[in-house]
Amino acid sequence: MSRVHRSLHGRVSRVHRGLHGRVAPAAAICTVPRDQCMRFGYTARIMDLTRRLAQRTRKVEFSGIRKFFELAGRIKDPCDLSIGLPDYDAPEPVKRAAIQAIIDGHNRYTPSAGLPQLRERIAAKLQEEFGQSPPAVLITAGVSGGLTLALMALLDPGDEAVVLDPYFVSYQHLVNMVGGTVVPVCTYPDFAFRPDVVEAAVTSRTKVLMINSPANPTGRVMTQAEVSAAAEIARRHDLILISDEIYDRLSYDGPNPCPFSEAPDNTLLLRGFGKTFGITGWRMGYAAGPEALIGEMTKFQQYTFVCAPSMAQHAALAALDTDTSGHHRDYRHKRDLVCRLLDGHFEFVRPSGGFYVFPKVPDRFANATEFAEAVAGHKVLVIPGNIFSGQDTHFRISYAASDDLIRRGCEVLCRLAAGK
């Protein structure tokens, strides 16, 4: 067998083996030249791959946000206001705790539910916050990991999840991945939670109502009245209210209301460490809620994520004792800065949390995609609103950047808005 033949045979065999279980990466297929495939009679096997892919692959798109993340890597000296990534590093005590955990040999699996001492600390923290402890806590691989497990446990094909539009990009695709149906509820122009409109979207197939506060992409923090109304809808219709609170420590104009104390039997609380402590790559979050639901999520975790990263769990114990008020103060300043720079040039709802603002596109542009492309021509990156919404009328700015980059980016945005 020739060297080329051996190489081709090995690669195609790997593809073939992958098709009996998990689909092999497309890159493994594309490395085989078409003429070599035809020469050795493998064309039909490779060309049949698309027929073997699951229907769910057609319902999930590549992340539009990640496309801009990759674009930033190709532009020289970009002004990147696109990615929701804190511009601060992990606190030194948290880094030292992770390093020490590795040195001490905490590099193996933990229980799938998470380190008992970490779960106990989180339960105690929630007891102090709400006056009651959640029935169960699960340590997850980030908030996205927790959301994935929750939707796997809750939704059967055809079941519905009501979400507020605009929404975090993962919501629609994660629901699609498990065979559910997203029911978006429009919140434009002020992004408020309107109980009558939300309740009208609930049907006999609805199992989940999802809220996100502070919100991505709008930066809006729900009012106590809105959160109470969401809790009441969940109780009345026997829904699980998933409260995504990844930005809960970045609420600038007051506390971020949580529905847990009002509907403990219906609320699944999702929080994380990544945004607050600058450790997004460590994938650390937690879910707290009804014991039956957390139990099923833990079961699914055993067969998917297995457990959250062990060294990161040990570091999370240190994070719970680490003061992040300086980041809160700095990002409130950045919020004020970006709003001051945009004022008079764009229509926008002043954000109260997180690190995003979601302005309306100037009338001289057809849509947000056109505007984002024009801005990219000036090396400034923002995200068009259709990534987060059924509408393409707004765009997202992430002010998780240096003040100089915020000023530079906003100068370009305002200049283009004025037609200069």
Image (cartoon, helix red, strand yellow):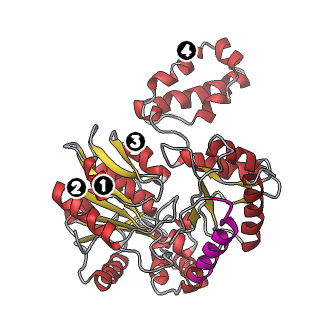
Q: Is residue 89 visible?
A: no
Q: Which residue is mark 1?
A: 209
> Label 1: few (<14), some or many (≥20) within 10 Å?
many
Q: Is residue 61 above or below residue 335?
A: above
Residue shown at 43%/30% (left/top)?
Answer: 20
Q: What's under tag 3, amino acid-wise?
A: Met
Whether residues under marks 3 and 2 lie with C-beta atoms below 8 angstroms apart, the answer is: no
Q: Which residues are magenta?
A: 329-346
Q: Give the labeled residue for mark 3.
A: 177
Q: Which residue is mark 4?
A: 44
Q: Earlier in the sequence, mark 4 or mark 1?
A: 4
Question: Residue 302 lies in what quarter of the image?
Answer: bottom left
Q: Which residue is mark 2?
A: 239
The local crowd at label 4, few if under 14, some if 14 to 19, many if 20 or more residues have their Cα within 10 Å, is few
Residue 101 percent across, percent down from the top left: 51, 78
Amino acid of disc 1:
Leu
